[in-house]
Amino acid sequence: MRILVVEDDAGIAEGLRANLRQRGYAVDVCDGVAPAWAALRADAFDAVLLDLGLADGDGATLLRRLRESPEGARPDALLPVLLLTARDQVRDRVSGLDQGADDYLVKPFDVDELDARLRALLRRAAGRSQPLARHGDVELDPAARTVRRAGAPVEVSPREFAILRLLLDARGRVLSRAQIEEHLYDWQSAGAESNTLEGHIHRLRRKLGSSLIQTMRGVGYFIPRE
Ligand code: CA
């Protein structure tokens, strides 16, 4: 899962980057409306954390642009947006929610709470109401960051966990190698990993059974609907 942090306070932005990366997210940071819009057009993100007062303008401008999704823009209408606001910005929060934001947090916020809200937004975006992602006897818990097979814990690496989470949330859809990698790696980590996607998939199949993750030759990988 890849998060775009749009925040012009470098301290908050770097704190978020470090914290969310530790929790297994890929994280990119932009300090203004223009770079964030460019990032959203260029890469696939799973959620946006949006500060309202930005270096080059108002976060609400980005939100409106995102929700209007003008011709040729890449962002899809379902991309969850969580506002990061100051305590006295009640009216901004209300209008932000009315302009298409999905949730908000008041600064200073607790990262555990932020992560819980992100998980809620991500599971809704995946069309899931229950907290666990399941397929057959395989069960992934995004909060505890654990995987079980037939009730027994299975050790997976953070990268394997991220790939499994992505494929489970996209169940029934084939994801190309490029699509998977785009949700897995941020700008800092892209190209920095020696393990290939094929290697991660191979290990996941060994641990969770060979029929869970299927290959559509020449297209990509998918987990079928049950
Ligand atoms: Ca700000």
Image (tube, rainbow, N blue to C red):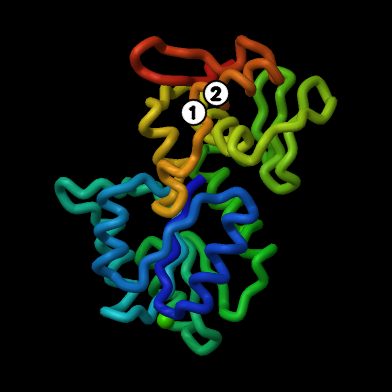
- Rendered view: 189 above or below 12: above
User: CB under 8 Å between callouts 2 and 1?
Assistant: yes
- Rendered view: 192 above or below 155: below
Q: Which of 27 and 222 is in front in this view?
A: 27
Regarding residue 46, the answer to whether it shows in the image is no
> What residue appears at the point 55 percent right and 23 percent down from the top-left corner?
199
Instruction: Name the quadrant where ligand 1 sits.
Output: bottom left
User: Which quadrant of the structure image shows residue 177?
Assistant: top left
| Residue linked to disc 1 | 196
Regarding residue 170, the answer to whether it shows in the image is yes
Q: Where is residue 162 in the image (x, y as percent from the top left)?
A: 58, 38
> What residue appears at the point 49 percent right and 44 percent down from the top-left corner?
125
Give the residue type at disc 2.
Gly
Side (left or right) of 191 relative to 118: left
| Residue linked to disc 2 | 199
Q: Which of 225 and 177 is in front in this view?
A: 177
Q: Position of residue 115 (x, y in %)?
A: 63, 58
Q: Residues within 10 Å of mark 2 (few under 14, many from 20)?
A: few
Q: What residue occupies the far left of the structure in this picture?
A: 71
Q: Position of residue 209 (x, y in %)?
A: 68, 13
> Does mark 2's beta carbon lie closer than 8 Å to ligand 1?
no
> What residue appears at the point 76 percent right and 31 percent down from the top-left corner?
155
